[in-house]
Image (tube, rainbow, N blue to C red):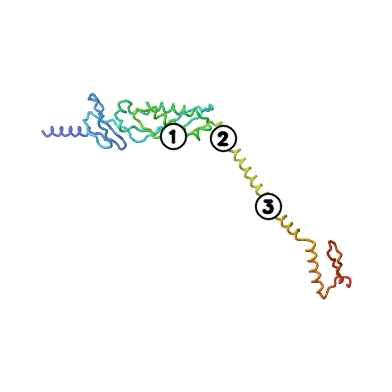
């Protein structure tokens, strides 16, 4: 009797343990009853926690967090240049439409619904741009791809967050040409800088020369004949008061100025 009770208790415990599933954080789940006609129970969605069910039943769970999928795509630009790039799309299931997603699409919704449209849109949109505009126009192209992707997957029970160009790989011939162009541009900019410095130095020299010229003109303008005669009379007055020197003043010098003759040199 005791052995039978133990067997029954063990069976009950096994049934209890086998009759529960755990929904991980970030996931939503629905009960799955394979022995019933409907199979999927669509009237209730379970979030993280324990879901109780019969041992022969189970759950179908979906990751409800934003998920990013990366794709390496080779494109041909408008000017017929092949470029390899990595482009990503971020999406997740619509929570309220989870039963419809499971019944109509399934867990492989990205591979079956999104990926083919996504890669096709990337190639198509970038083919309308020249290679030199691919990088600067990336935000504009990303927005176009996202809008078209939302439109093409409408009714597939998915929502999209963003499309991002993560990496662009140009052919070597392009990168070499760009490097050479940058080197030439830097050399030109250096020359332009040196020319500006030279122009500034020349301007400084011109300003200094102009200042010296103006100063000399002012001095020359002040040296009139009357002024020089006045200064000569001052000299005569000072010399006439000296007891040790004798001078003769001949008032017929050049420019009307008196000639001063030192008579002391003849006495020696």
Residue receiving disc 2 = 178
> Which mark, residue 207?
3
Mark earlier in primary sequence (2, 3):
2
Residue receiving disc 1 = 164
The part of the image, by quadrant, that contains residue 242 is bottom right
Q: Nearer the viewer, residue 266 or 63?
A: 266
Q: Is residue 201 left or right of residue 253?
A: left
Mark earlier in primary sequence (1, 2):
1
Please tell me whether mark 1 or mark 3 is closer to you in this view: 3
Cα distance between the residues tagged 1 and 2 = 24 Å
Q: Is residue 234 above or below residue 114?
A: below
Decide: marks 1, 3 in contact (CB < 8 A)?
A: no
Q: Which of 224 and 248 is in front in this view?
A: 224
Q: In this view, does 251 lie to the left or right of 101?
A: right
Q: Which of 111 and 230 is in front in this view?
A: 230
Cα distance between the residues tagged 1 and 3 = 58 Å
Decide: marks 1, 2 in contact (CB < 8 A)?
A: no
Please tell me whether mark 2 or mark 3 is closer to you in this view: 3
Residue ranking furthest to the left: 1
Dividing the image into 4 quarters, which one contains the C terminus? bottom right
Cα distance between the residues tagged 2 and 3 = 43 Å
SS for dot 2: helix
SS for dot 1: strand
SS for dot 3: helix
Residue at 82%, 73% (x, y): give it. Answer: 240
Where is residue 63? Give x, y as percent: 33, 34
Where is residue 66? Give x, y as percent: 36, 35
Q: Residues within 10 Å of mark 3 (few under 14, many from 20)?
A: few
């Amino acid at each position: 009797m005791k052995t039978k009770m133990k067997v029954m208790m063990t069976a009950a415990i096994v049934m209890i343990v086998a009759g529960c599933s755990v929904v991980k954080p970030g996931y939503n789940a629905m009960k799955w009853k394979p022995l019933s006609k409907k199979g999927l129970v669509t009237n209730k969605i379970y979030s993280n926690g324990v879901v109780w069910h019969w041992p022969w039943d189970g759950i179908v769970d979906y990751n409800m967090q934003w998920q990013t999928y990366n794709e390496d795509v080779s494109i041909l630009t408008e000017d017929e240049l092949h470029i390899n790039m990595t482009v990503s799309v971020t999406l997740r299931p619509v929570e309220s439409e989870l039963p419809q997603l499971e019944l109509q699409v399934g867990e492989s919704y990205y591979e079956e619904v999104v990926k083919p449209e996504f890669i096709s849109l990337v190639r198509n949109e970038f083919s309308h741009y020249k290679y030199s505009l691919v990088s600067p126009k990336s935000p504009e192209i990303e927005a176009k791809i996202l809008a078209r992707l939302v439109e093409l997957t409408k009714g597939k029970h998915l929502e999209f967050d963003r499309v991002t160009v993560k990496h662009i790989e140009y052919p070597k011939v392009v990168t070499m040409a760009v490097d050479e162009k940058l080197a030439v541009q830097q050399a030109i900019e250096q020359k332009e800088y040196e020319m500006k410095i030279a122009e500034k130095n020349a301007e400084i020299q011109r300003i200094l020369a102009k200042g010296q010229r103006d100063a000399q003109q002012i001095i020359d303008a002040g040296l009139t004949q009357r002024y020089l005669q006045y200064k000569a009379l001052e000299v005569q007055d000072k010399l006439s008061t000296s007891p040790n020197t004798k001078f003769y003043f001949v008032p017929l010098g050049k420019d009307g100025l008196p000639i001063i003759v030192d008579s002391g040199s003849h006495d020696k």
